[in-house]
Image (tube, rainbow, N blue to C red):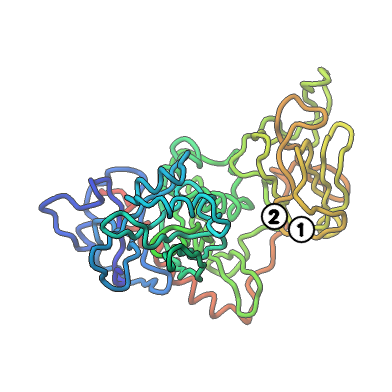
């Protein structure tokens, strides 16, 4: 594990090793004077519990993830790790694991308790322990609900048992610059889709990601990744982020106060970053038709007002409610097709039309939280293609969802302010450090 005063920088060298002749550690000053070779850099930080601010040295090679090892040396036993591939069968995976054991193969193919093995997703890692003849001694993998599943010999057969997995959270930092689109930039920076979606949600109240992005805009995200025995389990929450849009910096730090069921994002001064409403109910979509007093209707073939915004997206794309509210109605309605109407704070109403289906369990009168999925994009009703029709009403009057002034959420509580500022200082210092060194242009 790296000391807390070191970062890990990813490189595209073979086997993730530093080039021959290069020292493994260089002084921080040396890094800051190197020519910039690209506009996107990616860093992995030490585990969350060791997040520190004294970054005096930089490691130049990626640290390999640890593999599960036997607790004690067993003579003539061999260990091998393989990942599930698309189209894999039990026989094919066992072949790659060097398992030559018909009894084990039969058990894994037919035993009810081994069903989780047969349903492993693509990319999931499996570890096998075999003896010198290829007979299976033990098989380990991460199953449902992050349980560590162990299949091992017992007498003349096999047994399967689930153990509580030892989960480890690690913090990672990714920085990038917009060249063509936000999605392309986050992909190039190695930001997981889950974190990229969070990034747009966090800043959607201040930045219109459909209209306001410009070439040269920059972002930095610090987010969690959960591992079990060195294997990635899931992408966690963004802990801190900065987005520089047209020269203006927006920052957000996640904080959950003691005794609170959930946290929220705040500026470094403690003001809420989250607006009472998200600008868009869909991440990474394209506006196919904006708010207008008159437009040519593609189905009716005549001019009429368009009192909402159409977001083009594939059928089945999740639709998120833009603010906390109560479902007032949902069902099929004339030109809207499948539509949901939600009331917020009494005077605000949002409308979501042309849905392919509704979220499972959705009920009239149900309270829904901002960002929760309420339905899926479709092309029901009067429409010429798959998209979401979104309306924003204030006191019953439709307003442009992308331009209307949105109310702010509540600031940090006074009782939590001291703890928040201490946490915020750590993340802000890390973001400042990256901005002032690795992304600074040389004179």
Q: Residue at x 45, y 42 (%)?
A: 88
Residue holding disc 2: 372
Q: Residue at x 31, y 48 (%)?
A: 441
On the picture, is 411 further left or further right than 231? Answer: right
Seen in the picture, residue 375 relative to 295 is either above or below; the reply is below
The Cα–Cα distance between marks 2 and 1, rounded to whole angstroms, is: 7 Å
| Observer-nearest of 344 and 385 | 385
Cβ atoms under marks 2 and 1 closer than 8 Å: yes
| Observer-nearest of 178 and 227 | 227
Question: Which residue sits furthest front?
Answer: 156
Seen in the picture, residue 68 relative to 174 is either above or below; the reply is below
Q: Quadrant of residue 70?
A: bottom left
Residue holding disc 1: 368
Q: Residues within 10 Å of mark 2 (few under 14, many from 20)?
A: some
Q: Quadrant of residue 290?
A: top right
Q: Residues within 10 Å of mark 1 (few under 14, many from 20)?
A: many
- In the rendered image, residue 339, in percent from the top left (x then y), is placed at 82, 41
| Observer-nearest of 311 and 36 | 311
Dot 1 falls on a residue whose secondary structure is: strand
Dot 2 falls on a residue whose secondary structure is: loop
On the picture, is 97 further left or further right than 258? Answer: left
């Amino acid at each position: 594990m790296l000391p807390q005063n070191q970062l890990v920088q990813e490189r595209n060298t073979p086997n993730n090793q530093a080039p021959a002749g290069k020292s493994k550690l260089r002084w921080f000053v040396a890094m800051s004077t190197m020519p910039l070779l690209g506009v996107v850099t990616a860093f992995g930080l030490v585990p969350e519990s060791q997040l520190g601010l004294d970054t005096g040295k930089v490691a130049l090679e990626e640290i390999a993830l640890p593999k599960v090892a036997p607790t004690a040396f067993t003579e003539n036993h061999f260990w091998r790790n393989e990942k599930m591939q698309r189209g894999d069968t039990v026989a094919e995976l066992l072949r790659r694991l060097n398992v030559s054991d018909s009894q084990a193969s039969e058990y894994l193919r037919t035993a009810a308790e081994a069903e989780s093995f047969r349903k492993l997703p693509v990319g999931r890692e499996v570890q096998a322990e075999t003896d010198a003849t290829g007979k299976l001694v033990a098989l380990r993998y991460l199953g449902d609900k992050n349980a560590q599943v162990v299949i091992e010999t017992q007498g003349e057969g096999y047994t399967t048992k689930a153990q509580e997995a030892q989960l480890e959270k690690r913090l990672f930092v990714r920085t990038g610059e917009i060249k063509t689109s936000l999605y392309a930039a986050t992909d190039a920076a190695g930001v997981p889709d889950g974190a990229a979606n969070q990034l747009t949600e966090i800043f959607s109240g201040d930045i219109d990601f459909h209209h306001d992005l410009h070439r040269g805009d920059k972002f930095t995200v610090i987010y969690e990744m959960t591992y079990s025995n060195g294997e990635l389990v899931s992408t966690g929450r963004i802990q801190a982020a900065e987005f520089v849009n047209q020269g203006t910096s927006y920052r957000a730090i996640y904080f959950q106060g003691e005794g609170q069921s959930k946290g929220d994002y705040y500026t470094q001064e403690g003001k809420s970053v989250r607006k009472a409403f998200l600008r868009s109910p869909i991440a990474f979509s394209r506006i196919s038709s904006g708010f207008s007093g008159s437009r040519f209707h593609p189905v009716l073939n005549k001019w009429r007002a368009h009192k909402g915004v159409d977001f083009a997206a594939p059928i089945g794309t999740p639709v998120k409610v833009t603010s906390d509210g109560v479902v007032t109605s949902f069902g099929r309605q004339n030109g809207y097709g499948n539509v949901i109407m939600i009331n917020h704070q009494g005077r605000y109403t949002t409308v979501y039309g042309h849905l392919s289906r509704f979220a499972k369990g959705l009920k009239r009168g149900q309270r829904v939280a901002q960002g929760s999925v309420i339905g899926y994009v479709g092309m029901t009703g009067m429409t010429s293609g798959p998209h979401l029709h979104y309306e924003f009403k204030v006191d019953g009057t439709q307003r442009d969802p992308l331009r209307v002034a949105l109310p702010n959420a509540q600031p940090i509580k006074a009782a939590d302010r001291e703890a928040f500022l201490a946490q915020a200082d750590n993340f802000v210092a890390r973001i400042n450090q990256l901005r002032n060194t690795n992304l600074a242009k040389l004179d």
